[in-house]
Image: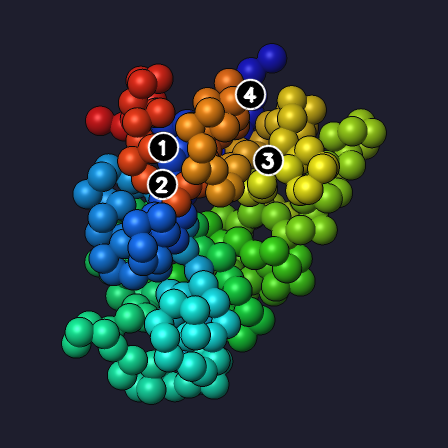
Amino acid sequence: MALKIKVVPFLDGSVPLAFAHRGGAADGDENTVEAFERAVKLGYRYVETDVHATSDGVAVVFHDATLDRVTGHTGAISSLSWADLHSVRIGGAALVPRLDEVLDAWPEIRFNIDIKADTGVAPTVGTVTRSGATDRVLLASFDDRRLTRARALAGPSIATSLGSRSVARLRLASLAGLPLRLPASVAAVQVPPRLGRITVVDRRFLALAHRLGLQVHVWTIDDPAEMERLLDLGVDGIMTDRLTVLRDVYRTRGLWPS
């Protein structure tokens, strides 16, 4: 029986999709203009990134809640205005880009956006909408309530993935053969291959996701043997920090887009 994967503009690439996780964090920087540019030059069409909001409601591209780990500066993103954050620089270059700047800079790239905090929901949806990027964005979060709010604000026009609780429900349904209903905008489930000793992605999980019309994207995979195993299993996309490793695996299989 043919699979009926949802047809949404975000997922218009040839599967399996290749995602540059945070723009390719293994190269030493993440979620920066330079990282995204590097991924695009390597041929990546899908970029995974993260969003917070400043104290004055500007959606910015950054993973952590604070500046400490990445920048060497201190302070929570949510406590800083955009003007304050924009002044954080190394070598004269701004470290934290605005989401609208990133969307505008690469109009052909699909952005998988993980909303990292409740305060980022409305600014993110607003930015995506104002930028005219609704067709090339997928909104993600571990937090189901955050995604529920994002869906309420965005409507069905922006694709979404599943939060942690919904993923658990999907996994249990795949094991028990139970029916499952999902919000209309859900187009993909994005998961690790396992959580501790618990396997998440197997043939049952993939079969149910596909019957529901969902693609399955797996993160964050940096080992080529694991990439090969997951591709053999039939996943629809892989997120990686090691951009050249995933590219080479896809090329060997004839999967890398021309």
Q: Is residue 211 visible?
A: no
Q: Quadrant of the N terminus?
A: top right
Q: Position of residue 59 (x, y in %)?
A: 40, 71
Q: Amino acid at mark 2?
A: Arg
Q: Which residue occupies 55% across, 20% down? A: 233
Q: Position of residue 188 (x, y in %)?
A: 54, 40
In terms of image quadrants, where is residue 90? bottom left
On screen, residue 18 versus residue 236, left or right, reads left
Which of marks 3 and 2 precedes in the sequence?
3
Mark 4 touching mark 3, by CB under 8 A?
no
Mark 1 touching mark 3, by CB under 8 A?
no
Q: Amino acid at mark 4?
A: Leu
Mark 1 touching mark 2, by CB under 8 A?
yes
Give the Cα separation between the discs numbered 2 and 3.
17 Å
Which of marks 4 and 2 precedes in the sequence?
4
On screen, residue 108 versus residue 25, left or right, reads left
Give the Cα separation between the discs numbered 4 and 3.
11 Å
Q: Position of residue 258 (x, y in %)?
A: 22, 26
**What residue does disc 2 label?**
242
Q: Position of residue 94 (x, y in %)?
A: 24, 73
Give the Cα separation between the discs numbered 1 and 4.
16 Å
**What residue does disc 4 label?**
233
Looking at the picture, tell me which residue is in the foreground, 146 or 39: 39
**240 up-or-down from 178: above or below:** below
Q: Residues within 10 Å of mark 1 (few under 14, many from 20)?
A: many
Q: Which residue occupies 29% across, 80% down? A: 88
Give the Cα separation between the discs numbered 1 and 2.
7 Å
Q: Which residue occupies 42% across, 75% down? A: 67
**What residue does disc 3 label?**
193
Give the Cα separation between the discs numbered 2 and 4.
21 Å
